[in-house]
Image: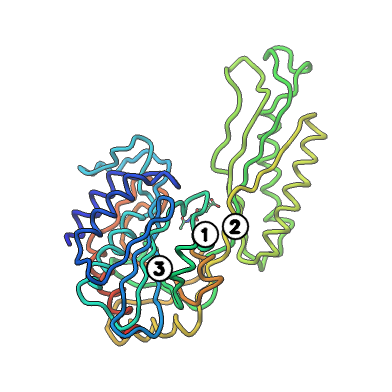
Amino acid sequence: MDLIETRRALHRIPELGFNEFKTQRFLLNKIKQMPQEHLEIRTWRTGILVKVAGTDPAKTIGYRCDIDGLPIREETGYSFQSDHEGQMHACGHDFHMTIALGVLDKLARQPVKDHVVFIFQPAEEGPGGAKPMLESDVFKAWRPDIILALHIAPEYPTGMVAVKKGLLFANTSELFIDLKGKGGHAAYPHLANDMVVAASAFVMQIQSIVARRINPLDSAVITIGKISAGTKQNIIAEEARIEGTIRALDPDTMKEIKKNIEAHAAGIEASYQCQASIDYGANYYQVYNDHTLTESFINYCKENDYAFTICPEAMTGEDFGYFLKEIPGFMFWLGVNSEAGLHSSKLMPDEGALSKAVDIVSGFIRYKGS
Ligand SMILES: CC(=O)N[C@@H](CCC[C@H](N)C(=O)O)C(=O)O
């Protein structure tokens, strides 16, 4: 299978969570071109599960990748840039899918003793595909005993593995706040309740939560990524919407942050005479790597001289955390050496990482599964 050609084709067709219809068709088409003798294929919504039957199975190994893109207008200048205006694979899921296909292709040709289940999961960026997928009959029927996944890391050299035992990624929660006040003429502010001013005050106030309400020894982040309000420069805005994300390494810190956001929202309601409604959207459980399996992966990397480092935990989120909550396994970072980072319109991961990752993952599955 030509990995670079596959990645470029996937890069052209990013689709948002649970709308990955073209992506699903593309993946199914690729999978059907592989030797079928040992394969069983099932779909779940826009996702796909593929089982490679083991030759003498004692367990099932799971390998998961995510398949959705982001609402970002691409600015890479690639000749193969996104055909979908305003959508881009800016979190490397085109890499994740290509690597999964590459590993699957190898195992379809030469299975290991254990069963291996490949999980092409939709909607990682939101609203979250992992949780409902875990509850699906198809997943339950093929439920793996151990599971692994990777995420590209622009900051590490191409092909380098970065991993740690225990906590790798934070608990996350989306944050959507709708403010409703009273619109009016720009010249008569005393007759209106201006939601641009209320939203601005709210965004500034919640900056003090991490600084002043959370123990400095705990890590937490509140980022507001989007604000929308108003219709025209001389009309007082009746409504405002604030969209963001909350991150915390400890689930109790997450609860504390939410409690404080609610208190600030109540304060804004009183001060600015408006209604504030809060929706926490998708919440992702932390990514916690199993100690024994991560140790085994570290040993495997050392024995095979793969470039490797122990990394610190990160405030990124991943709904792979839900798989790891129920099934022992781990996630690792794969270096792709890009100046632009994740969620950047200029993310340009080095394609040299693709074949290295296929070797690393297929080798580890063979190491654990033969
Ligand atoms: C690896 C990565 O970038 N993951 C995303 C996960 C999104 C979680 C959710 N939509 C949220 O914004 O809280 C991330 O932003 O860390």
- Asked if the residues shown at circle 2 and circle 1 are in contact, with their CB atoms under 8 angstroms apart, the answer is yes
- On whether ligand 1 comes within 8 Å of the CB at mark 2, the answer is yes
Q: Which amino acid does label 1 sit on?
A: Gly
Location of residue 267 by image quarter: top right
Quadrant into which the C terminus falls:
bottom left
Q: Which mark is residue 149?
A: 3
Q: What element carries label 3?
A: strand
Evaluate whether residue 62 shows in this view.
Answer: yes
Q: x, y (%) of residue 126?
A: 50, 49
| Mark 1–mark 3 distance (CA, rounded to whole Å) | 14 Å
Disc 2 from disc 1: Cα separation: 8 Å
Q: Specify whether tag 1 is near ligand 1 (CB below 8 Å).
A: yes
The disc, 3 or 2, on the residue closer to the chain's N-terminal end is 3
- Give the mark, 1 or 3, whose residue is nearer the N terminus: 3
Determine which quarter of the picture holds residue 204.
top right
Would residue 209 be found to the left or right of residue 167 on screen? Answer: right
Please state which amino acid type lies under the numbered disc 2.
Arg
Q: Could you tell me residue 243's position as x and y percent?
A: 59, 41
Q: Classify 10 Å Cα crowding around label 1: few (below 14), some (14-19), many (20 and above).
A: many
Mark 2 or mark 1: name the one nearer the start of the chain. 2
Q: In front: 212, or 3?
A: 3
Spatial separation of the CA atoms under disc 3 and disc 2? 21 Å
| Of the pair 337 and 118, the residue shown nearer to us | 118
Answer left or right for 321 relative to 259: left
Residue denoted by label 2:
247
Residue drawn at (20%, 63%), measured in percent from left and top?
34
Which mark lies nearer to you, 3 or 2? 3
Task: Give the numbered dot on residue 317.
Answer: 1
